[in-house]
Amino acid sequence: MRIAIDISQVVYEGTGVAKYTAELVKKLLEIDKVNRYLLFGMSLRRQKALKDFAESVLPLNSRTMVKILPLPQKAGQILWNKLHLVDIEQFTGRIDIFHSSDWLQPPARAKKVTTVHDLVVYKYPQTSHPDIIRAHKERLRGVKKECDLVFADSLATKDDLVNLLKFNPAKIEVVYAGLGEEFKKTRCEEIDRVRKKYELFDDYILAVGTLEPRKNLSRVIKAFEKVSRNPLVVSRRKPLELVTVGKTGWQEKLPQTRHIRSLGYIDQKDLPALYCGACLFVYPSLYEGFGLPVLEAMACGVPVVTSDRGSLKEIAADAALAVDPEEVEDIALKMTRIFMDEKLKSELIKKGLENAAKFTWKKTAEKVLSFYKKLVRNSSS
C-alpha cells in the first residue's frame, strides 16, 4: 500500500492533536516494514517545523517520502473544506490511503480515512473561537459525505458522531490514543531538579491543558481556594499551590498569586517529573474527545480528579475520583478527600498505574494499520 498522512497539525506543539499525529506517525513507521508512506503537510510560516519533524521520524529507506506545500492552511480550508476542489493526488501522486488531519478534508480518489478527536464545536461552541467552529463544521461535512473510515478517539466521540451528526456507525472505529513511554515514575533527583527549575512549593496540585474555557480552570481555581483554606487540609500539610501548565488558548486569563501559578508551555522533557512531583492532578474539563493528561498523570503515580462526563469517565474508569465539572463544591470535596484519606490515595495511585498501562501507541498504530489493510483489501475484492 501507498499511505499518505497529513502531518500538518504537528506544528501546534503542546496540543493533544499535535501529540496524536506525531506519535501515531512515529509508531506506524516503526512497526510497518512493508508499506510505503508519504508524509504530507501544508504550512507557510511553519513549513520548516514540518520538514524537521518528517526528517526526525523517517527511516533511512526508499519507502518513505515527504511533501510539504508552502501554503497557509487557510488556503486549504477554502480549497478543500469550503469548495471541495482538487484531489489530494495532485500533490501526492497515486496513493491507496489518505489519512487526513483534523483540520483539512481534501477530496481524493484513494480511500479516505480521518480521525475525529471530539465534537466540541457542536457540544460546547461557547468555548471555541468562531473561526475554529466554522472550519471544523465545514470539514466534518466533507468527512461525513466522503470518508470511507473514521477513527474516533473514544466511544463517547463515536456516540456524538452518530447521535449529533447522524454519521453511519458502520464507518466508525474506536481506536484509543496511546501514552508516551516517557510518562512513568521518575527518580527523586529529577523531580527535585524540576521543582527547583520552576521554583515550586513542596506540595502542589497540577492542572495540564491549553488555557481555554473548555478546560474549566476558573472553577478549578475556585475549588483550590476552598481546599487551601480548609482547616483540616491546612493542619495536615505544608503550604499548597496550584500549578497550571499549557499553551495560551483564547478568552482565558488566570490570576497569578503566590499560591496560583501558570507556567505556560514548558519543555516537554520536564513534564513527567512535574507530574511525579504533584500531590494531586485535577482535570475536570467540560468536554474532551479523549483526555490524554489524565493517563499521563496516572502513569506517573499521581491520584487524579476528573470530570464524570463523556470520554473522561470512559478513559479514567474507576481509577480516578469523578466530579460534576460545573460544581465547584464537588471538585473541592473530591480534592479534599484525597488529601485526607491516605488509603484512598494509595488505591487511586495503584488503579491509575494499572489503567494507564493499557494504553500504548504501539497498540494504537497496530489497530490503525489493520484497518488500513482491511479497507484496501475490501475495495479490491
Image (cartoon, rainbow, N blue to C red):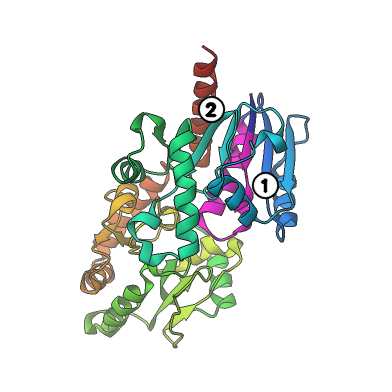
Q: Nearer the viewer, residue 117 or 198?
A: 117
Q: Residue visible at 46% across and 68% down?
A: 277
Callout 2 amino acid = Tyr
Label 2: which residue?
Answer: 372
Q: Residue visible at 70% across and 50% down?
A: 53
The crowding category of the residue bearing disc 2, from other C-alpha atoms within 10 Å (few below 14, some 14 to 19, many at least 20), is: many
Label 1: which residue?
Answer: 41
Coordinates of residue 73 in the picture (x, y in percent): 63, 54
Q: Residue visible at 54% across and 49% down?
A: 82
Mark 2–mark 1 Cα distance, whole angstroms, equals: 20 Å
Assign a secondary structure to mark 2: helix
Q: Earlier along the polypeptide chain: callout 2 or callout 1?
A: 1
Residue 211 higher or lower than 228, as above or below: above
Going by the image, does 118 lie left or right of 273? left
Going by the image, does 162 lie left or right of 183? left
Coordinates of residue 349 in the picture (x, y in percent): 34, 56
- The question of residue 360 being in magenta is answered with no
Q: Nearer the viewer, residue 7 or 106?
A: 106
Quadrant of the rendered structure where residue 305 is? bottom left
Which region shows up in magenta?
A: 4-31
Assign a secondary structure to mark 1: strand
